Amino acid sequence: MNRQLLELASSVCRGTFGELATAGTIGGGGGVMAPPDQQAEHDAMMQVESRLREIAFNLWWTWHPNVIELFRAIDPIGWRETNHNPIAMLERIPADELARRVAAQSLENRINYHYRRLLEYLGSDQTWCSEQAGALRHSPIAYFSAEFGLHESLPLYSGGLGVLAGDHLKSASDLGLPVVGIGLFYANGYFRQRLDAAGWQQEDYGTTDLNTLPLCRVARPGTSPVTVELNVGSERLEAGVWMARVGRALLLLLDSNVPSNPPHLQQLTARLYGGDETTRIRQEILLGIGGLRALRALGIRPAVLHLNEGHSAFAILERVRERVEEDGLPFEEALRETALRTAFTTHTPVEAGHDRFGQELVERELGWLRDRLHIDSGRLMALGRAWPQDSHEPFCMTVLALKASRYRNAVSALHGHVARRMWVHVWPNRDEESIPIGHITNGVHVRSWLAPSMNRIYDRKLGADWPAHQSEPATWRKLEAVDNGELWETHNVLRRNLVDFVRRRVTGSAFDPHALTIGFARRFATYKRSTLILSEPDRLARLLTSVTRPVQIVMAGKAHPRDDAGKRLIQEIVTLSRDPRLGGRLAFVEDYDMNIARHLLQGVDVWVNTPIRPLEACGTSGQKVVLNGGLNFSVLDGWWAEAYDAANGFAIGDAMTHTDPAVQWRRDAASFFDTLENVVAPLFYDHDAMGLPHRWIARVKQSIMTLAPRYNADRMVGDYVRQMYLPAAGGQVSG
């Protein structure tokens, strides 16, 4: 099926650089015929340029450091100025100048080599999926998500949910699992963060230049672009479809900005998580119902619907409508049949994170669908109510997804317990432990987050094929034999790179490339307690400015535009960072995105996470730190609750939670400062005569060896295949 998906992509994509190059519109062409030798040279250069742009048009390059280095070599300044966007960078370079740079640096062979690697990757049938889950090769998994974080140059994400979705697609591609992602195209993306003089977050929205994105307009050969049509209330909405290639996987993005729509509907998909309740429900109608219709328009009939959070749950109702109208099934039977092939992942244990809509709004926007399902308003509302008889309860997207899917999971072991308790009332005749919500702990796409220097160590020490075996503990045990000096010096360089980055981005920073560096970055919501580690300013100042054991802290993150409490936390941190007592050793980096995340995650010595337990569903940032030789120092929540073993990192507090949040705050703050002063800093600065902290390095090795095989996205996707996709598709695990 992967080959069929790739053939489909080739047949329906319009406007790619590859096509333009083939047509002779890049790198000159036309005019007077050149002499044969010059013409041959020109044709060869045209082919090189075409291949370079074809590589840029498949996001496969984002997890291959040698390809990234190739793009950077062509134009280091342009690479940085375009936010690492190879298409935008290449657009800035005239054809003759590009040819000169390729020749001057002898890049032609490198370009051809990586082009062949891409073709071999796309064409290979020898994959994990072909060996372990052959039943899934014939029909793809449809993976719905409101956001996808694939790279900083494609701003279709706000945070962890989107980055997780992007990592899911990348690992599915590596495993050979046929997956089509379905999302929305946000022309303005998520907001750019700017802090004013008082440290208050301001939100700026730009407009994305489609000509510089790795997207193509979906159109059948010889026809106009593919669109999907659906109702939103009494209005007719038309949406175009864009396609991105993510290795072997595909991503479809629906876009309401088409001329046939009135202006207010053209703006429907402009912003991620923007607008009022009407905008939100209409975006979710387009994502779920429109997304399934986009698949149908391309002839794709997925084996399984996987809903990444409840935003896309209306896809279930659209699938039920198809069964009712096309197969003549009664509504209840169609609902049951659809549930059997639907998987749902819930991510948030916080009530405010679940979308709810009033009955009047639901009826106004979805009455047309209810009519076609042959059900009344009460039955429709009951699907989204935990207590169906409560006429005042709003319609909850998560409840719909829970009721209308057979396979349901939380994203860590602890989150599984929380989710079962949180949604116990959806199944009133069951006790908490029998609630049918399991868990699959999140993992990260290793090579997307791995520093090139660490990647080189793994290539040499673990074997060139280690990525294919990254979920096997034996692969990582080889790290024990890595020389301590090599590992330490590699991490020192990464820390130095982070310090340089902070100095460039933060005025007044006095960061030291040799000091113990702590990182903290995430969405600024109150339950994440971002200011806990700053709650004793005098004690903090002594730690940061210590002559013998200095510490420095770099922080980043955004608050939701409507979350003033979160904005106040950012302001508090920025204000404290200007306190002269701290000596410039606390820095807040504006406009957190995947690029800033990569710098922090690869360069810190210690990563801190301080949520109110058990409100962190998983929290994958610390998993990325592990891969790059950093250690976690966190509350025992989310993934860290199941990962920490006392020898692979540090814990803030214990697994007990006080009923009074203020008491818990004081406990955790005391634990943080005591452990930092008495355990973390002494261990980091305990060097031998050669300057090596052997006990620290031993803990780093233990962290990588015990955690890397468990918390990678290949393992995560494999768990989804075994526990959800194969049973839902009616297949069996082979081998």
Image (cartoon, rainbow, N blue to C red):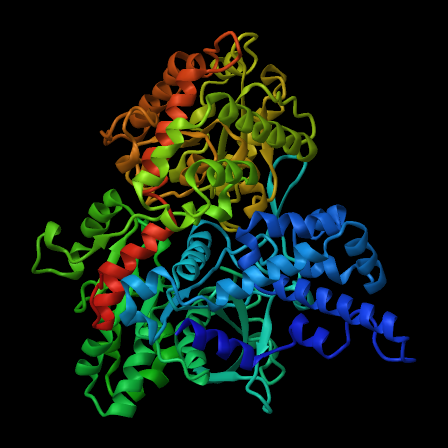
Residue found at the very far front of the displayed protein: 37
Please tell me in which quadrant of the rendered image residue 536 appears.
Answer: top left
Question: Quick one: 602 or 121, which is closer to the camera?
Answer: 121
Could you tell me residue 645's position as x and y percent?
27, 28
**Along the horizontal axis of the image, is 102 left or right of 626?**
right
**Along the horizontal axis of the image, is 168 left or right of 588?**
left
Residue 345 versus residue 221 in the image, above or below: above
Residue at image location 66% in from the left, 66% down from the top: 51
- The reply to whether residue 404 is visible in this rendering is no
Residue at image location 64% in from the left, 73% down from the top: 16
**Along the horizontal axis of the image, is 297 left or right of 315?**
right
Please tell me in which quadrant of the rendered image residue 631 appears.
Answer: top left
- The reply to whether residue 557 is visible in this rendering is yes
Question: Quick one: 729 or 383, which is closer to the camera?
Answer: 729
Could you tell me residue 363's position as x and y percent?
34, 78
Q: How many marks?
A: 0
Residue 475 versus residue 88 in the image, above or below: above
Please tell me in which quadrant of the rendered image residue 494 appears.
Answer: top right
Could you tell me residue 476's position as x and y percent?
36, 37
Could you tell me residue 342's position as x and y percent?
27, 69
Where's the N terminus, which quadrant?
bottom left
**Along the horizontal axis of the image, is 375 left or right of 129?**
left
Residue 685 versus residue 281 in the image, above or below: above
Where's the C terminus, which quadrant?
bottom left
